[in-house]
Image: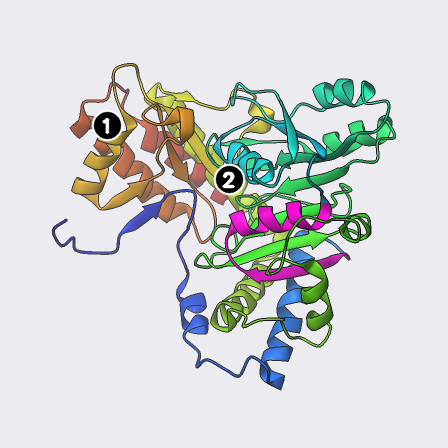
Amino acid sequence: MPYHSGRHTLQIPGPTNVPDRILHAIANPTIDHRGPDAAALTRTCLAGMKKIFQTEAEVMIFPGSGTGAWESAVVNTLNAGDKVIAFDGGQFATLWVKTARNFGIDVEFLGGDWHHGANAEELAARLQKDKQHEIRAVFAVHNETSTGVTSNIAALRRAMDAENHPALLMVDTVSSLASIDYRHDEWGVDVTIAGSQKGLMLPPGLAFNAVSAKAAEASKHSTLPKNYWRWDDVRVQNQNGFYPYTPATNLLYGLREAVKMIEEEGLPNVFARHKRLSEATRRAVRAWGLEIFARNPAEYSPSATAIQMPDGHSEVDFRAVVLKNFNMSLGAGLGKLAGKVFRIGHLGSMNELMLAGALCGVEMGFELAGVPHRKGGVAEAMAYLTASAAA
């Protein structure tokens, strides 16, 4: 592409914009990963991440992606042939299940229309049939990045507890951690999975597992092959602030700064900001006369909005027009939604003016691409943001 003046607008649901403070922190000189400075850095990051997971349980940080965090959760807690329930809620739920099946896990899908989140009543009905407690785990994606749908994790735990079922509850928070209120301890989650490149405002490269005592006990009986992801090895070394291999020290510098920034804003304020920006986005979509992919307003995502394209119009072509003319990247349709929806990310390092500019790019892109719409979506979003600021 030819040179575009100004900064590229990255409006995908992750990786997200990396603030200058974090970029500068990452640019610190690389240190001895076996020295005292590295040990102090690791301990600070682990303590900070406990606050963000809202947990007293142990947290592990790996060099890796969210996919690596999925694999770590699977290989440390399960065995080949184990039965698992998962909710077919979107592309990332599908990919997590693929990871499990590659290790010989027997996964049963529930749900499947992608417009809705995980259904606690459906889970309860399935667990009632499991008299022998053969189901070893329940997989759920807190916020499905591909669809803009958020699931009620607390309701899933209540359903499991009502049936007195011993299955582990494993939750993907890759696009919700530090963006949407998430409570590892209060909601009774056994393994929470996350990555660095979304609400934490970092580049890709760090994977996280928050691990309950129950999950830690299950790991003692798991025989799946593992080396890099082995919790025991990481746990022993982390006690002294170290790792069983070379950690991503410069990304840990960035993580320490990200945690500090989140603490300065205040976690409740972070969540409120994401809700505010997402509501402005949805008001723009409705004003344009387009359809939000998520069907249940209670499940609307505070971190990403998926928007259905009108019949006969491709999101691929539309996004190409926006990128060419306005140097802005929008999220693609993924899996069976390819060509059918585009996604606006409004998470991480994002404020009102950044969102307003992005919505302007979308509305102008509709005009240039010949996408049927009503004008005024940007004005509707601006009116809401203005009223919110005055409140």
Pair 1/2: label in front: 1
Secondary structure beneath label 1 = helix
Which class describes the residues within 10 Å of circle 1: few (<14), some (14-19), or many (20+)? many
The answer for how far apart the CA atoms under marks 1 and 2 are is 24 Å
- Image position of 27 with respect to 209: above or below: below
Residue occupying the point 64% across, 52% down: 225
Q: Are marks 1 and 2 in contact (CB under 8 Å)?
A: no
**Magenta region: which residues?**
57-77
Which kind of residue does numbered mark 2 sit on? Arg
Image-based side of 205 in relation to 317, left or right: right
Residue 2, percent across and down?
Answer: 11, 51
Residue 226, percent across and down?
Answer: 63, 55
Residue 100, percent across and down?
Answer: 60, 38
Residue occupying the point 61% across, 61% down: 61
Which class describes the residues within 10 Å of circle 2: few (<14), some (14-19), or many (20+)? some
Of the image marks 1 and 2, the number of the one nearer the N terminus: 2
Which kind of residue does numbered mark 1 sit on? Phe
Q: In which quadrant of the rendered image does the C terminus lie?
A: top right
- Residue denoted by label 2: 276
Q: Quadrant of residue 232?
A: bottom right
Secondary structure beneath label 2 = helix
Q: Quadrant of residue 190?
A: top right
Q: Is residue 177 visible?
A: no
- Residue denoted by label 1: 366
> Extreme top residue here?
311
- Image position of 265 with respect to 358: above or below: below
Residue occupying the point 13% across, 54% down: 3
> Extreme left residue here?
2
- Asked whether residue 156 is drawn in magenta, I would say no
Image-based side of 377 in relation to 273, left or right: left
Residue occupying the point 43% across, 81% down: 29
Image-based side of 35 in relation to 185, left or right: left
